[in-house]
Image: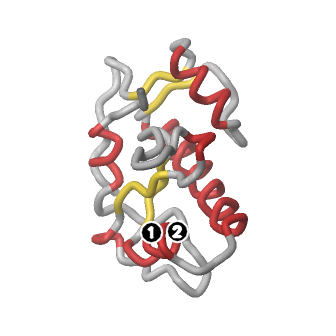
Amino acid sequence: MNFRCPKLLKDARSRSCLMRVPGVCCGNSETSVAAHANWSDYGKGKSIKAHDWASARACFTCHTWLDAGAAPREQKRRLWHAAWVRQLAEWLRRGVITSAIELSNPDPQAFAKAIAQGLIVVYPRASRPQPQE
């Protein structure tokens, strides 16, 4: 069963785009939502979205590029992963997640294991979501 957290998805709305695809990004934060990973190592399966922790904020045009654009899969993966690393850093800074492990370049399987072991906690009880930027 994949990790679901509606608060993480809601947190992505109306914030600045973290994908920033060159030549694609519209920069309109009002269209930003959580863009889930499109690869099985992040929990993606046939008709199954990746884990909610495997998402990075993206504006409408970047999200569309990720899901339906003609770019090579490796380019999409590289740009999405960079956005995810920025997303994790922001979540840590804002207290949305806490982590007992290094998250500067996380491996998705290690991340999933750390969540299951309680080494990464999403919305710790002592923390509340910060106001939108």
CB atoms of marks 2 and 1 within 8 Å? yes
Q: Residue at x 55, y 43 (%)?
A: 88
Q: Quadrant of the N terminus?
A: top left
Colour mode of the rendering: secondary structure
Amino acid at circle 1: His
Where disc 1 sits, the SS reads helix
The kind of residue on which mark 2 rests is Leu
Name the spot of residue 99 as percent of width and height, x first.
Answer: 57, 24
Q: Position of residue 132 (x, y in %)?
A: 29, 53
On the image, the x and y values in percent for residue 29 come to 35, 70
Measuring from the top left, give residue 118's x and y in whole percent.
51, 14
Query: Where 54 sits versus 34, above or below?
Result: above
Question: Callout 1: few (<14), some (14-19), or many (20+) C-alpha neighbours within 10 Å?
Answer: many
Q: Is residue 30 above or below residue 53?
A: below
Report how many numbered discs are placed on residues in the image. 2
Give the residue number, with chain letter if any, for mark 2. 66
Q: Nearer the viewer, residue 127 or 49?
A: 49
Image quarter in which the C terminus is found: bottom left
- In the depicted structure, whether residue 79 falls above or below residue 88: below
Q: Is residue 103 left or right of residue 52?
A: right
Identify the secondary structure beneath mark 2. Answer: helix
Quarter occupied by residue 77: bottom right
Residue 133 bears which disc, if any? none
**Residue at 70% over, 61% down:** 78
* Residue shown at the point (43%, 82%) measured from the top left: 26
What distance separates the C-alpha of mark 2 from that of mark 1?
Answer: 5 Å
Q: In percent of the image, x 40 and y 70: which residue is there?
A: 59
Residue lying furthest front:
46
Q: Is residue 115 above or below residue 73?
A: above
Q: Is residue 87 toward the left or the right of residue 8 in the image?
A: right
As drawn, the label of residue 63 is 1
